[in-house]
Image: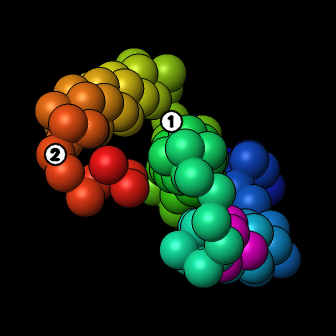
Amino acid sequence: MSDTTTHEHHPTPRLYVEIALTLGVLTAMEVSTFVIDFAWGALPLLIVLMSIKFALVGGFFMHLKFDIRFYTRIVATGLFLAIGLYAIVLTTWLGVPGFFGN
């Protein structure tokens, strides 16, 4: 086998730098939710940003994009379970005085 057939789907270093910069921008957006008052919009925004970052890191840095789909489904199941757990915990905290301005 030649080197071109074994590594033809591997991303270039430039793509990794672009992904790292994108992750940096997304992290800055997450941090901005603590500085700018988004009120109730902060939680959905944070969950969306978390999911995008999860997909980028899992897809490229963990190489799930290049593996069989079964591994991607296992990791995606973990993401959906985590979001469900966050939703359950947040609904129990919504009645606590002082949480979200209550």
Magenta segment includes 70: no
Check disc 1 and report its element: helix, strand or loop: loop
Dot label at residue 34: none
Which of 86 and 38 lies nearest the eye of the viewer?
Answer: 38
Amino acid type, callout 1: Asp
Which of 97 and 85 lies nearest the eye of the viewer?
Answer: 97
Viewed as shown, does residue 94 lie left or right of 5? left
Query: Looking at the image, is 90 positioned above or below residue 37?
Result: above
Viewed as shown, does residue 58 lie left or right of 93? right
What residue did someone put label 1 on? Answer: 67
Residue 83, position as x, y percentages in the image: 35, 33
Residue numbers of the magenta segment: 25-29
Dot label at residue 96: 2
Magenta segment includes 27: yes
Residue shown at 73%/74% (left/top)? 25
Which of 11 and 2 lies nearest the eye of the viewer?
Answer: 11
Q: In this figure, what is the number of numbered marks?
A: 2
Instruction: Residue 20: tell me if it is visible.
Output: no
